[in-house]
Image (spheres, rainbow, N blue to C red):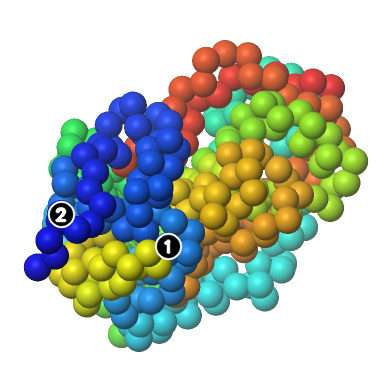
Amino acid sequence: MTNLSDVPVSDIDLYSDEVLSDPYESYRTLRDAGSAVYLERFDVWFIGRFKDVRKALSDWQTFSSDKGIGLNPIINEAWDEALICQDPPVHTERRKMINEVLGPVALKPLADTIDGRAEALSQRLVDMQQFDAVADFAHDLPIGVVMDLIGWPEDVRPSLLKLAEGSWNAAGPDNARMRSGLATLQEMMELITEVYDNNRAIEGGFASRLIEASHQGAITRETAIGMLAGYIVAAFETTISAMASSIWLFADNPDEWNKLRSNPKLAVSAANEIVRIESPLQNFSRWCSQDAEMSDGTVIPAGSRVIVSYASANRDDRQFAQPDRFIIDRKEKMNLGFGHGPHGCAGQGLARMELTAVFTAMAEQISGFEITGQPVRALNNISRAFRSLPANIIK
């Protein structure tokens, strides 16, 4: 057993309202304390330096997902069949089904649809002038494109969006948000199960293909439902978060918007920078299957639960120059906002297409953005997002 007198220890509460509202100073404190820091409040280890996070995400044999990615046993049991809670070779086989829908070949026919929707969205914002960056902007492409791609029945779409927003809370430690998230997650699972059992998915979409694979015996009913649930939560919440954050970041950094207007080809790197500096999914948990030595020599003992922090790694000054600055043409291209290794975000290609299309379209018509009211954060154990963000178009 590790002697805690020999390792960095912290009593920081990463899940308090104060820290969730602005976590980056706490991340810095933990990074500066060591490659791995024992959080005594939660009996977990925090990994926050870029080098160590990237290594942990690659080394699934040591930092395993198959005991769940949450910080409580209830969610880890409930999500047992979700793709993010599987290791290779099971994960590899199941992910092939996702890649058939979200790989480059499959997404290519969607390009014109996404571009057209992005141009229409940009024009609508110009016409509105005053808008909410979440409801009026960020919801448009993820809902319109992803809902069709998956093939959810029209009548369940509004409910799925609302339920997806709070479900990540269930992966946190035992607190009020976690308990609320479990109730939300249960409601979402019941809705998905109803669609599955009554075969109501729209023909040709990802959901109908998963359901058909289940009926043919390639996967179980529970696996199909679990995979659909995992995709819902990730696909909506993360892209919506990045979209809304883009308005906030460009309003606060008008020179960066002017860079994009002068060179629309920077839209791709702008999307990456948004995901770096405001990582939509801040942290996931892993189970340490064997003693793991970090880059500074700290050893995490086998059997430990760890927090692997994408958001902390993406602000690490050991990896990024001026990590707290939003720079759309920064030289350091690699970041972990979409994850890394076997569990790298399966939907990142689609997310990048949506973000790039929107920025390209808006750069042609919009001179800038202003935040016109108090931003409201949607405090969440895992994700970082706005609930509302009043804004104004500068024509």
What residue is shown at x 80% (from left), y 50% (from top)? Answer: 266
**What residue sits right under mark 2 in the picture?**
5
- Where disc 1 sits, the SS reads helix
Q: What is the three-letter code of the residue carrying label 2?
A: Ser
User: Residue 210 sits in which quadrant?
Assistant: bottom left
Q: Residue furthest front?
A: 6
What residue is shown at x 66% (from left), y 39% (from top)? Answer: 326
Q: Residue furthest right?
A: 262
Q: Are marks 1 and 2 in contact (CB under 8 Å)?
A: no
Q: In front: 376, or 211?
A: 376
Q: Is residue 326 above or below residue 220?
A: above
Q: Is residue 101 above or below residue 124?
A: below
**What residue sits right under mark 1 in the picture?**
53
What residue is shown at x 72% (from left), y 50% (from top)? Answer: 330
Q: In front: 319, or 235?
A: 319
Residue 150 picture location, percent across and down: 50, 60
Q: Neighbour class for label 1 at 10 Å: few (<14), some, many (≥20)?
A: many
- Where disc 2 sits, the SS reads helix
Residue 373 picture location, percent across and down: 57, 13
Residue 36 picture location, percent across and down: 31, 58
Pointer 1 or 2: first along the chain: 2
Q: In front: 150, or 377?
A: 377
Q: In front: 68, or 186?
A: 68
Residue 288 picture location, percent across and down: 24, 70
Q: What is the three-letter code of the residue carrying label 1?
A: Val
Drawn side of residue 192 relative to residue 263, left or right? left
